[in-house]
Amino acid sequence: MKRRYPNEFLFAAVALLLIVICSQFLYAPWVRPTAHALLTDQARRQSDPTYIPERSLFVIVKDYEQETCMIMLLWAVSILTYKAVHLRREQRVLETNLVHVPDGVRILPEDTREYARQIEAFEQSNGSSLLPRALLVALGRFAATRNVQDAANASHTVCQTEGDRLDSELSMLRYIAWAIPAIGFIGTVRGIGNALGQAQKAVTGDISGVTSGLGITFNSTLIALLFSIMVMFLLHALQRTQERFVLDAESYLDDRLIRHMYVR
């Protein structure tokens, strides 16, 4: 089998490693120092009591929970992109006329071997995909049983099995969509804990520690929910495209092959 794409697990692992490295190069020298400078502008605060620090994106995403959520988001996008590219390759096969059967011509059980050779030649040069597998199964079942209904059921079973496989392979993306809000909740708990730890200072009039802890709480919750919505949208879009692909493959089988089968 000709493989044009790397193993998906290897791709996901390498993508995660690269995203973590890039995130560290981004956060360590730029994001956190900038956010720290915005939060510690003490000189201006002392000279202008009415000064309110600017609500900056750097401050919102500076904490470790937000960084982790961003890593998970980019990881999900990379996996989604890999699957989308692979699915597009499968969809292009549907645009190919693998079974050259003119209108009015019937496929008899004795003719299946010739049509199977055409499909096998396509597989050898283009790699395995759903449509050639389903076509070969249908032709093989038709030659063995001489029953059109058996051939149709066998080919549709292949499509349904492929649909179940595609759906099961979305489990990692579903985990990421669940993990992002969970990470945000960790930041929420940590922020509330920090705020409660500074409650004694708030009694004396210094509420900076409490506001800092609450800032962690709200920022992590905001980022986690926002990123979770994005991942879920992309996940459902991919799932819809996969389901449509399976249905199109079944329609292809019925229109291009099954309806031409005939038993004397």
Image: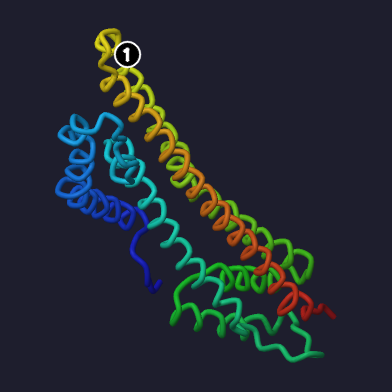
Looking at this view, is 180 or 196 the one in front?
A: 196
Seen at 24% across and 48% down, the residue is 20
Looking at this view, is 54 or 130 the one in front?
A: 54
Looking at this view, is 142 or 171 the one in front?
A: 171
- Horizontally, residue 19 falls left or right of residue 248, namely left
Residue marked by disc 1: 196
Q: Looking at the rendering, which quadrant does residue 184 occupy?
A: top left
Location of residue 1 with respect to 205 vertically, above or below: below
Seen at 40% across and 71% down, the residue is 1
Q: Looking at the rendering, which quadrant does residue 40 occupy?
A: top left
Kind of residue indicated by mark 1: Leu
The quarter of the rendered structure image containing the C terminus is: bottom right
Secondary structure found at label 1: helix
Seen at 57% across and 69% down, the residue is 133
Q: Position of residue 114 (x, y in %)?
A: 62, 86
Colouring: rainbow
Q: Residues within 10 Å of mark 1 (few under 14, many from 20)?
A: some
Q: Position of residue 197 (x, y in %)?
A: 27, 13
- Horizontally, residue 145 falls left or right of residue 10, namely right
- Horizontally, residue 231 falls left or right of residue 66, namely right
Numbered circles on residues, count: 1
Q: Position of residue 89 (x, y in %)?
A: 49, 73
- Horizontally, residue 228 falls left or right of residue 260, namely left
Location of residue 214 with respect to 24 vertically, above or below: above
Location of residue 105 with respect to 44 vertically, above or below: below
Q: Residue furthest right?
A: 264
Q: Position of residue 52 (x, y in %)?
A: 31, 35
Seen at 54% across and 55% down, the residue is 166
